[in-house]
């Protein structure tokens, strides 16, 4: 291992960071996001008349926001990891401001849709903001900060409804966008004044192809889901969009696996904790939005339906406000639960609580109070679950990839919410009834179906979360319990605290082979000498890695790569240091080919996967010896071919992550395998 010049973080002590102010500003950014999504909802029935268009066209005011939020979230999150989280926070805020101004100054449908689309980029504020908390807050503040930011999504939604009603009844509809834009200007100034920029960044090129493919896939899928209610689920355009999304996604995944610097690190996303948390996020996002939509619509339904209460938009918002406030009040409680019981347990508890709330909603719906209480229980569960999910994600990914990982988690939650919106619309449309006053309204059975679907989704999320590995606390001392290797490549078995030790410097370096060829997808892990985990990361297409360290000092650096024996060394890492690693020992598949005990030279040896895919070939030397680079772990078939006599012999073998030897006699067929650990 060798060292050379690199980058370091400027001196910034934890005491110099205004942690409370950072939490407040970023939490208010979350409120801005939810306001963007709910402010126009009360006006949707009136927008066709206001903008002289059809209801289907007016629905694009919501669809455009949904699409840009979904497409922009993974892209902006990746850019935040590369170029700075505060920078991308400011860019998103400017997008909201410009979008609000366009909408406020326009009376043309297309221009308002464009403005709404730009405002949709505000959704990216949430994953980027959570990642900023991870970088700058001390350990004891990260959990409560993340929980509060997640909770403000609920209170923003609750405030947006009555606020929109009051503004619309007393002012011109353009005022809605002036208010949201003005709030964004205030938050922009606050971000400039309060939020520091993080130098925990990755280098390299942006994955333009991956971004394009993912954008196309998401656009096709969400467009089909959001417009299927008007187009029809079996219509050619809906089916074509869904098929197109599947095909593009099928091309995107292998591209991301091959890319040296992918938009989304599929390998990290497939880690057990990340994969299961993201899977649960889709279901919990579905349940959360199903609860919000049905609560808002149920209390506004005419009393003649037998289950509605005929509330106005303003009164509906006031009814929903306690749920939003409850989510905010639960944020410090959620953080305390995460500290005491762990995020896995809190995620399970939150999902089960949402399920209980939905079951209560299906049984208790005779008064506004019953609706408030049961929907409030579901909101309480949402606060717990939403606080736990980012914590689980951040514990399982490298520090330099927190924004990207949180962006993917936010995207999957939005896919869940979009699916809930589509299902609610489809179920309501299929079960309309006529009240005694001649009004059209969904039947009670439609609500019951959605309630049970929401309960099933929430409990399904809880079931998935039970398969997340339960971290084991280190036994050495309190500090060891706080560090650990929850996201380390060697396993997910030790509890790790978020924050606490601000990354003072970044260690960069390259991992190369003996000839200087860069090794892609190698894993570099850095630990303190006593074994406490600090950070880990994968190399890009040029073999480069980036690790964030809390302070200069001596560390244990461990590097592993497929087909190579792992290397480790105690190294002194300081400001301005770059650590390069040369892998020297190649793992091999080797052995001898015999002819009734006599070594056979110039014999072809081929290797295929057990499933039939070709891997490679080699030839034996005059001593009957062959060798090849060790393939990835799995089941294979090795075949020896003597072309002079036409004889062949095949044997199955299992390759592990160690050098493997297989001797084979082409006459007797008797293998003599041994495995040598690297």
Image: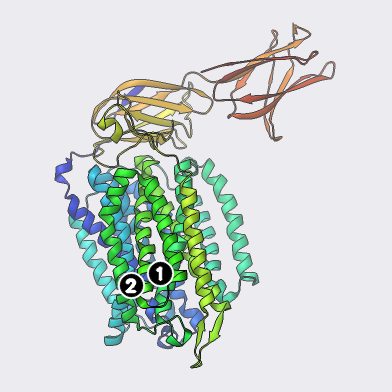
Residue extending farthest right: 645
Mark 1 lies on residue: 292
Colour option used? rainbow
Instruction: Identify whether 618 is placed above or below 521.
Output: above
Disc 1 crowd, CA 10 A, few/some/many (<14, 14-19, 20+): many
- Element type at mark 1: helix
The structure residue drawn at horizontal position 54% and vertical position 72%, both measured from the top left corner, is 227
Is 71 left or right of 499, judged from the image as shown? right
Q: Which residue is mark 2?
A: 320
* Distance in Å between CA atoms under marks 1 and 2: 9 Å
**Mark found first going from the N terminus, 1 or 2:** 1
**41 left or right of 660 in image:** left
Front residue of 194 and 445: 445
**Residue 430 on image: x %, y %:** 58, 77
**At which x and y percent is residue 527?**
33, 28
Name the quadrant containing residue 594: top right
Q: Which image quadrant: the N terminus?
A: top left
Query: In the current view of this chain or complex, which residue is farthest to the bottom?
Result: 437
Given contact means CB atoms under 8 Å apart, are the residues at marks 1 and 2 in contact? yes
**Front-lying residue, 332 or 10:** 332
Q: Residues within 10 Å of mark 2 (few under 14, many from 20)?
A: many
Residue 327 to residue 208: above or below:
below
Q: Position of residue 660 (x, y in %)?
A: 60, 19
In front here: 214 or 678?
Answer: 678
- Whether 275 is drawn above or below 39: the answer is above
Q: Which residue is at a point 51% across and 71% down the rendered structure image?
A: 448
Q: From this viewpoint, is residue 104 visible?
A: yes
147 to the left or right of 211: left
């Amino acid at each position: 291992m060798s060292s050379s010049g690199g980058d370091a973080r400027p001196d910034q002590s934890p005491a110099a960071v205004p942690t409370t102010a950072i939490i407040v500003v970023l939490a208010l950014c979350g409120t801005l996001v939810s306001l963007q999504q709910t402010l126009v909802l009360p006006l949707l029935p009136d927008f066709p008349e206001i903008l002289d268009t059809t209801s289907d066209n007016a629905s694009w005011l919501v669809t455009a926001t949904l699409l840009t939020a979904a497409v922009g979230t993974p892209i902006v999150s990746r850019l935040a990891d590369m170029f700075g989280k505060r920078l991308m926070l400011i860019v998103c805020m400017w997008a909201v401001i410009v979008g609000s101004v366009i909408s406020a100054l326009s009376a043309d449908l297309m221009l308002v849709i464009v403005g709404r689309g730009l405002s949709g980029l505000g959704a990216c504020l949430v994953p980027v903001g959570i990642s900023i908390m991870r970088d700058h807050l001390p350990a004891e503040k990260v959990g409560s900060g993340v929980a509060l930011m997640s909770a403000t999504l609920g209170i923003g939604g609750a405030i947006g409804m009555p606020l929109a009603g009051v503004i619309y009844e007393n002012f011109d509809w353009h005022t809605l966008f002036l208010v949201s834009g003005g709030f964004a200007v205030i938050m922009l100034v606050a971000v400039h004044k309060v939020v520091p920029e993080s130098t925990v960044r990755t280098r390299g090129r942006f994955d333009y192809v991956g971004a394009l493919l993912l954008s196309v896939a998401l656009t096709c899928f969400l467009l089909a889901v959001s417009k299927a209610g008007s187009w029809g689920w079996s219509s050619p355009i809906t089916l074509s969009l869904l098929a197109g999304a599947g095909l593009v996604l099928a091309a995107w995944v292998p591209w991301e696996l091959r890319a040296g610097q992918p938009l989304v690190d599929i390998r990290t996303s497939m880690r057990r904790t990340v994969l299961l948390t993201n899977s649960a996020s889709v279901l919990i996002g579905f349940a959360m939005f199903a609860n919000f939509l049905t609560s808002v619509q149920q209390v506004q339904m005419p009393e003649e339906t037998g289950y509605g209460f005929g509330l106005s938009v303003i009164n509906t918002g006031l009814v929903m406000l306690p749920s939003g406030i409850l989510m905010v009040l639960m944020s410090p409680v959620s953080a305390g639960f995460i500290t005491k019981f762990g995020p896995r347990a809190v995620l399970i508890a939150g999902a089960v609580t949402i399920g209980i709330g939905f079951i209560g909603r299906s049984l208790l719906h005779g008064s506004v109070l019953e609706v408030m209480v049961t929907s409030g229980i579901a909101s309480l569960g949402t606060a717990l679950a939403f606080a736990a999910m980012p914590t689980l994600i951040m514990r399982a990914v490298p520090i330099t990839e927190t924004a990207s990982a949180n962006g993917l988690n936010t995207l999957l939650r939005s896919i869940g919410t979009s699916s809930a919106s589509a299902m609610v619309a489809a179920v309501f449309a299929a079960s309309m009834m006529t009240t005694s006053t001649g009004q059209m309204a969904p039947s009670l059975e439609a609500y019951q179906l959605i309630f049970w679907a929401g309960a099933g989704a929430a409990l399904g999320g809880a079931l998935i979360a039970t398969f997340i590995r339960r971290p084991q606390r280190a036994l050495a001392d309190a500090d060891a319990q706080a560090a650990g290797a929850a996201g380390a490549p060697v396993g997910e078995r030790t509890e790790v605290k978020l924050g606490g030790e601000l990354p003072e410097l970044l260690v960069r370096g390259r991992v190369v082979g003996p000839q200087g060829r860069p090794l892609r997808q190698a894993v570099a892990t850095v630990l303190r000498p006593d074994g406490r985990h600090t950070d880990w990361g994968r190399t890009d297409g040029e073999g480069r890695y980036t690790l964030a360290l809390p302070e200069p000092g001596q560390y244990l650096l461990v590097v592993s790569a497929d087909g190579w024996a792992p290397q480790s060394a105690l190294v002194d890492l300081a400001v301005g240091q770059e650590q390069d690693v040369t892998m020297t020992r190649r793992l091999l598949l080797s052995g001898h080919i015999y002819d009734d005990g006599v070594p056979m030279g110039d014999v072809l040896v081929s290797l295929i996967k057990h499933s039939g895919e070709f891997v490679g070939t080699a030839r034996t030397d005059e001593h009957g010896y062959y060798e090849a680079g060790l393939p990835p772990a799995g089941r294979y078939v090795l075949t020896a071919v003597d072309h002079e006599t036409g004889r062949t012999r095949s044997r199955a073998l299992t390759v592990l992550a160690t050098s493997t030897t297989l001797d084979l006699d082409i006459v007797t067929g008797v293998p003599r395998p041994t495995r040598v650990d690297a």
